[in-house]
Amino acid sequence: MNKTNNDLPELTQVIVEALQDKKASDISVIDLRSLKSAVADFFVICTGNSKPQVHALYENVDRFVKTKLQEDPIGIEGRENMEWVLLDYYDVVVHIFKPETREFFKLEKLWSDATITTYENLN
């Protein structure tokens, strides 16, 4: 399903915009609010096709959110190997994967009982 960003909270919209700006592939937003076991309200998931692109994506998300919303993540994990970088904004967790890592963990399948919205790259 492809929706407009207006259906999402502002933080999630800014994150999707930052990912589209750096040509992330396969952007998905998982709305976890209806699930009691969820650790966040939203997961934003995307693929970067190389370690340099994963790096550029995570830096762009960090920069967009700081510039537009004056928010910093409470944590960033995975910067050492650039296979899977996670930015934690408490209610929104961003997962930036290399293709093979995303395929291995299959987060969309794990959270398939939630509402999943996909976005095309606009660039």
Image (spheres, rainbow, N blue to C red):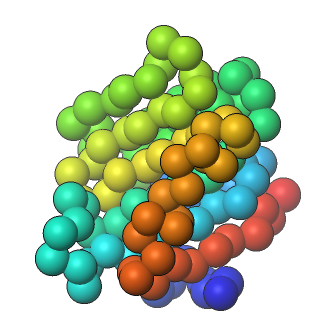
95 over 45 or under it: above or below: above
| 98 on left or right of 91 | right
Residue nearest the viewer, comparing 118 with 121: 118
Q: How many marks?
A: 0
Residue at 21 percent of width and 51 percent of height: 90
Q: Is residue 118 left or right of residue 105?
A: right
Q: Is residue 65 left or right of residue 47?
A: left
Residue 87 lies in what quarter of the image? top left
How far across and how far down the image is residue 63, in percent?
48, 36
Q: Splitting the image into 4 quarters, where does residue 55 fall? A: top right
- In the picture shown, does residue 75 fall above or below 5? above
In this rendering, does residue 8 appear at all?
no
- Considering every residue shown, the one lying at the far right of the view is 123
The quarter of the image holding the C terminus is bottom right
* Residue at position x 70%, y 38% in the image: 100
Looking at this view, name the residue that lies furthest to the top.
80
Q: Quadrant of the N terminus?
A: bottom right
Q: Name the residue nearer the viewer: 3 or 98.
A: 98
Spot occupied by residue 72 in the image (x, y as percentages of width and height): 28, 37
Name the residue at 35% across, 66% down: 42
Residue 87 visible in the current orientation:
yes
Q: Position of residue 10 (x, y in %)?
A: 38, 69
Closer to the camera in the image, 47 or 58: 47
Residue at 76% from the left image edge and 28% from the top image edge:
50
Q: Is residue 42 left or right of residue 59?
A: left
